[in-house]
Image (spheres, rainbow, N blue to C red):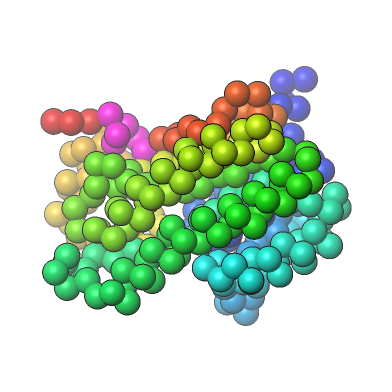
Amino acid sequence: MGSSLFDLTGRTAVIIGGTSTLGSVMAEAMLDHGAHVALVVRSKEIAEEKLAHLIETGSATLFEADAAVKSDLERVLGEIKDWSPAGRADILLHAAGTNSATPFFDITEEEWDRIMDVNAKSVMLACQVFGRSMIDAGHGGSIITISSVSSGPPLSRVFTYSASKHAVNSMTQFLAREFAPHGVRVNGIVPGFFPAEQNRAILSPERVESIMSHTPMKRFGDPKELQGAVVWLASEAASGYVTGSLIRVDGGFGAMTI
């Protein structure tokens, strides 16, 4: 009886950024718990090989869109509703992200705009498009954002990334209040240091030593260690009273000072 709390059978989960290291692993978890998964990717051609193991389940399909373009998201929502057994999106996981270690005085407007578009603007747009769809459908829903331990206090060397993830935290809590009367929950996962593509470039030996000294568990996270949190937030187990929460999965990083 307890296992039914985490059963996602009959629900359609939309994952924006499904080709990311964390996004694909969290997609796998939702598939394992019975969901149909719509993988929204920038390029189907690039994603097909990387996500073949998910597509082969028969319960996952690729949809192509630029997550920072609202008209693309509106189009893909229609395609997902046509594909979904229930004709709707029940869960939205926004896992798209990009990073840069450019020193502050060297950051160009173009770089700032690119990172903000992917990490923050696309969250706002996805919540407009899919949040509205969930509210209109009248079946509630779960929106899950992916933040970062750099969201506050900010992490050194990643100025724009830290600012964008702080914005994600704010949007998550604002929209939790906005959508609560409609039964749509909005929560965020705050990962610590996982071997995702966007943070490999800044992990010098000195950086690794600094991270480890600030992480009580003294290791990096395995992406699969995010699976429990995402399934919980998507499922009936969290449906009663969990909204506006930022759930840390960071090996204790956020609990450390000196």
- How many numbered marks does the figure carry? 0
Q: Can residue 188 be spotted in the picture? A: no
Task: Name the quadrant containing residue 11.
Answer: top right
Q: Residue furthest top?
A: 1
Task: Name the quadrant containing residue 38.
Answer: bottom right
Q: Can residue 162 be spotted in the picture? A: yes
User: Residue 157: x and y, percent?
Assistant: 19, 58
User: Residue 221: x and y, percent?
Assistant: 39, 44
Q: In the picture provided, is 103 more to the left or to the right than 119?
A: left
Q: Is residue 4 above or below residue 105?
A: above
Q: In the picture provided, is 59 more to the left or to the right than 234?
A: right
User: Residue 35: x and y, percent?
Assistant: 74, 46
- What residue is rendered at 60% in x and 44% in y? 143
- What residue is rendered at 41% in x and 35% in y? 248
Membership of 253 in magenta stretch: yes
Q: In the picture provided, is 133 more to the left or to the right than 252?
A: right
- What residue is rendered at 55% in x and 66% in y? 67
- What residue is rendered at 24% in x and 65% in y? 101
Task: Report the magenta residues as a range.
Answer: 249-255
Q: Of residues 9 and 151, which is closer to you in this image?
A: 151
